[in-house]
Structures are given as C-alpha cells and as structure tokens.
C-alpha cells in the first residue's frame, strides 16, 4: 500500500462517481486491494482542488491508456482490517 506516495485513478471515473453521488444522494467509495493491505476512500474526495494530470500506463503500447487522471495521497485512504 505504501510502495507509492499516491494512488492514480481516471478523472472520468471520479467525475462519474461525483455524478452518481449527486443523483442518488448516497456516498460513493473507492475500495482498493494492494498486495499487502486494503483501503477505502470517499469519491468524490473531500479534497479541493483535485490533483489532475495526464497519466496512465504505457506498458501495453496503447495510446488510449493515457488520459487525465486524479492523484490521491495514500493518507486519503482508510486502511481496512479483518477484525
């Protein structure tokens, strides 16, 4: 979980989460499973402004994998425990 300082997710997904939350009036969460831990954070995040940049994966050689992304600090995630 702490191998990197930030977690990257598509801006489009964050925008759709915000729209879903506004439409339903219900909270939306992002749950992530890393190799060592699991965590959860609220979408859209309670941080303003969002840290937006161009990013993505170049491993597959697909230019469509590069898109606007949002970066979350790992401190934005609440660690889930098995208790």
Image (cartoon, grey):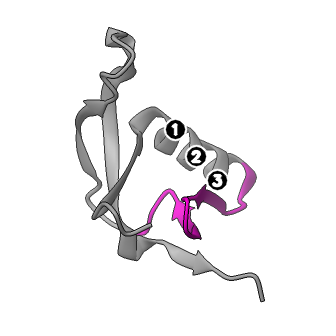
Cβ atoms at labels 2 and 3 below 8 Å apart: yes
Q: Label 1 to label 2, Cα distance in Å?
A: 6 Å
Which is more toward the observer, 33 or 53? 33
User: Can you name the residue that lies furthest to the bottom here?
Assistant: 83
Q: Is residue 30 magenta?
A: yes
Quarter holding residue 57: top left
Quarter holding residue 80: bottom right
Residue range corresponding to the magenta coloring: 24-46
Q: Which mark is residue 21?
A: 3
Which structural element holds mark 1?
helix
Cβ atoms at labels 1 and 2 below 8 Å apart: yes
Q: Tell me where residue 1 appears, x and y as whole percent.
A: 45, 66
User: Can you name the residue that lies furthest to the front here?
Assistant: 35
Quarter holding residue 49: bottom left
Cβ atoms at labels 3 and 1 below 8 Å apart: no
Q: Is residue 47 above or below residue 8?
A: below
Which is more toward the observer, 54 or 6? 6
Q: How many marks?
A: 3
Q: Is residue 23 above or below residue 36?
A: above
* Left or right of residue 23, residue 56 in this image: left
Q: Which mark is residue 13?
A: 1
Q: Tell me where residue 78 appears, x and y as whole percent.
A: 53, 78
Which structural element holds mark 3?
helix
Q: Label 2 to label 3, Cα distance in Å?
A: 6 Å
Q: Nearer the viewer, mark 3 or mark 1?
A: 1
Q: Image point 29% across, 55% down: which residue?
A: 50
* Left or right of residue 21, residue 8 in this image: left
Q: Image point 75% across, 82% down: which residue?
A: 82
Q: Is residue 39 above or below residue 34?
A: below
């Amino acid at each position: 979980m702490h191998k990197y300082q930030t977690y990257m997710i598509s801006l489009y997904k964050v925008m759709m989460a915000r729209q879903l939350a506004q439409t339903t009036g219900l909270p939306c969460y992002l749950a992530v499973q890393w190799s060592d831990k699991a965590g959860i954070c609220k979408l859209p995040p309670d941080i303003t402004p969002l840290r937006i940049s161009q990013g993505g994966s170049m491993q597959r050689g697909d230019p469509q994998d590069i898109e606007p992304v949002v970066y979350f600090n790992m401190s934005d995630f609440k660690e889930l425990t098995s208790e």
